[in-house]
Image (spheres, rainbow, N blue to C red):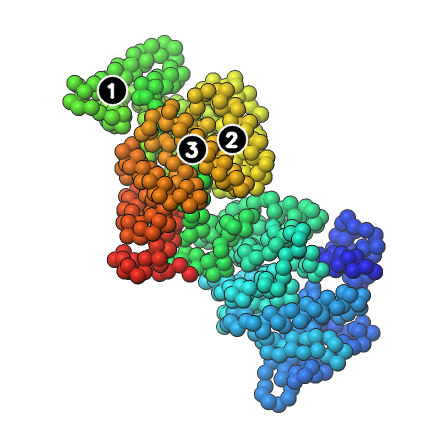
Amino acid sequence: MKTSVEVQVLQWFERALAQKPGHRKLWLADQDMEQGVRDRVLRLLDADQASGAFLEETAVAEEALPPEFPKVGERLGAYELLKPLESGGMGVVYLGRRADDVYDQQVAIKLVRPVHLLAAAEFRRQLISRFEDERSILARMSHPNVARILDGGSTGAGIPYLVMEYVDGVPLTDYCKANKLDVRARLALFAKVCDGVQEAHRHLIVHRDLKPDNVLVGENGEPRLLDFGIAKILEQEPLPTDGKRHTSLSAMTPAYASPEQVRQQALTTSSDVYSLGVMLYQLLAGVRPYELGGLRPSEAEAVVCDTLPDPMRKMLEKAALTDGERKARRAQLTPDLERIVAKAMHKESVRRYGSAQELADDIRRYLDGQPVLAHPDSTSYRVGKFVRRHRLGVVAASLALVAVLASAGVAAWQAHEARQAADDMARINTFLKDVVAYSDPYVAGGNPTLAEAVDSAIKQVDVRFTDRPDLGAGVRQVLGSSLLGRGQVAKAREQLEQALADTLAAHGPEASLTFDIRESLAQVSNHEGRVEVATDELQRLREDMEAAGHDQGWLYFTVLNNLADLMIQQERYGEASRLLAQADAMPIESLEGLSPDARAVLRANQGNVAHSQGRLAEALAIYDEAERMQREAFPQGSPPLWTLLSNRAFLLVDMGRKQEAHELRKRTLAEQRQVMGEDNPQVLSQMFGLVMGELEQGNVEAAVAMAREAVDLSRRGLPQPHRETVMAQAVLSRVLRDAGDLRASEEVLAAAEADLDRLEAEPEGLRGAFVVQRRKLCEEAAPLRLPRCNGVAAPE
């Protein structure tokens, strides 16, 4: 038999062993393979079933074992085989003891699985080579959470064996279940597992088969990492020219394997971080994130590589827990834990934790009540994610107050019967005239801003519509949206919650205005950093609108699009795609109340999904189509178009076309300023991208100049403190650090931290990013002994 066929047989055999014993042959019959390979695997399964019994207390007949295989009672060097303990895919483990009377010690002795010694000569050679690798790997490590190698050698027949520390324990998940560990105890235990994996990574060793069964926990509660049988030493494994690891013994466990491992791509320590994430998910949720049993290899690959797991809180419903345990576990699964697991299991290896130690550190930060660093901590990545977020239905701060209040009049007209509408409109018009009069400097005694005019309008609503809260609800709704656009999140919530109470009392839960206000409140939750809450609110709103028959208008389209945007933020791309497809099927152009570029905005979101999933060429084509549609709707440009162009620039960077991306950002900023004016703060996100572009090209002075300009612009054009100003200062601090002006960088960072403390709603993940930025700065500025760096630990 050719080696390549032998490898196929081995791989299918290992996959079959991963199935339940009673279903292995049925599973194998359903797989797509050559009949000769299937027959060979069936013979191995039969042989395994026969020889597998030798691991029971009563031994199997001698003829089931190769004649040269060691037997219980025999000695291997200084050690005696006492009894078999367990059997894995490639090896078997015996309990042994030191038999030379030097000292008494129980050990674990690992040998090649007997059935594999019956295979072809080339296959047997590879097995022996694997054991030699494992012995070399274990000899390099010494850590309390890694099972130590004590000795090794070969039998007289040339069968290699390993003598290891005997761990009298149970698998990780079994230990947690038997001891009824709560979430905090599970996290503390798992952090030690990460420590053991980090020891391997410190020696440039990738385990490649991390799973609960390979972590045993002793009675003392200490975990030990086992089974480095398929591990690889990175420095000894060059990548083939085709970019794939054609390892003949790729005996991974698919349910815990990383996307790059499933695809047989180049492996790094990040692959083990992914497997740790799967293990942590299972420890906390009670089930694995994916169930691959019965799937064909191509189907399993699609699940691992392209499907995001459900949140752990949702998966608790599938766990084998009592109602009391499920309720207690759900209360302990916080958003920070969801984020930690999501970062460890990110499909893109570069977005995971940089090491097992970083994962352990974030877990311990969580246990200590400190901010976690689960969200991306680089300014450029956060800016990229931020500028991709745009929502329909939110009134920007730059809209004229006349238009804002006029829309309230339209809402009032629709909310009342025709005979009341004229009187209501007259009342709103009177209110409008009085508010507009406030902008007259001779009336106001100064030169009030739009923001001051809106604040004045809020005070007058409380007086003018006391007897007609139904009319005031519409006014409060648009004023609340305006406040939200200005970053005054708490005031926006106050107005919108009052508006919701008023419209519920006046019109009931199924009124259009009620649904509209609920959508605005979901946007407030999003601005508060409570993305999951906002998602739940929009999900419920969508269901209620469908039940009430309000699933055909502009607001329903807006809800679908905004809900998809939230899914993109949470990297739930499959759900986002389905929502966008549903919205795309609506007759968008005929829906009154939507902007002419509504379909273009939707198409851009579809491009964001493709971009985030790594389908770069497809994303570029979608962005091209969306840009064409945007320019047809608004030839002079518009905020959604500029957001689209910014996203396109990030895509070009990911495609390696950085200079092209930089030039696109310059053109976009120039177009924005021509249309909106030099000092409009809506250009800030584009400026952030340009700053990072200049920095990437080594133009540090230009980056510093533009970063300073962005800080000045945000302070002039936005109410303070504002999250855009905090972001601008973070960017400036970063570029000053790169420019070598460490004292100035520290001063700007301190100002940003102070502003962050004063924000009504803290941007998600920003505080953790500041912690990292300060540590890096203080490490570089150590010789300067900056006062604010006292007690700040350097990055590990």
Tell me which amino acid carries mark 2. Answer: Ala
Counting residues from the N terminus, which is met first, the one under dot 1 or under dot 2? 1
Direction from residue 774 to residue 82 in the image, left or right: right
Mark 1 burial class by Cα count in 10 Å: few <14, some 14-19, many 20+: many
Q: In the image, what residue occupies the spot 46% across and 34% down?
A: 663
Q: CA distance from mark 1 to mark 3?
A: 39 Å
Direction from residue 45 to residue 379 in the image, left or right: left
Above or below 736: residue 516:
above
Tell me which amino acid carries mark 1. Answer: Val
Element under disc 2? helix
Tell me which amino acid carries mark 3. Answer: Lys
Direction from residue 524 to residue 102 in the image, left or right: right
Above or below 346: residue 657:
above
Q: Quadrant of the N terminus?
A: bottom right
Q: Which residue is mark 2?
A: 604
Q: How many numbered marks, from 0 up?
A: 3
Q: In the image, what residue occupies the spot 49% across and 65% down?
A: 195
Instruction: Choose top left, top right, bottom left or bottom right for residue 127.
Output: bottom right
Q: CA distance from mark 1 to mark 2?
A: 38 Å
User: Observer-nearest residue: 717 or 738?
Assistant: 738
Counting residues from the N terminus, which is met first, the one under dot 3 or under dot 2? 2
Q: CA distance from mark 3 to mark 2?
A: 20 Å
Q: In the image, what residue occupies the spot 36% across and 46% down?
A: 735
Question: What number is the disc on residue 666?
Answer: 3
Mark 3 burial class by Cα count in 10 Å: few <14, some 14-19, many 20+: some
Q: x and y percent of residue 599 in the render?
A: 52, 25
Element under disc 1? helix
Above or below 346: residue 519:
above
User: Observer-nearest residue: 645 or 175?
Assistant: 645
Above or below 580: residue 52:
below
Q: In the image, what residue occupies the spot 40% across and 23% down?
A: 513
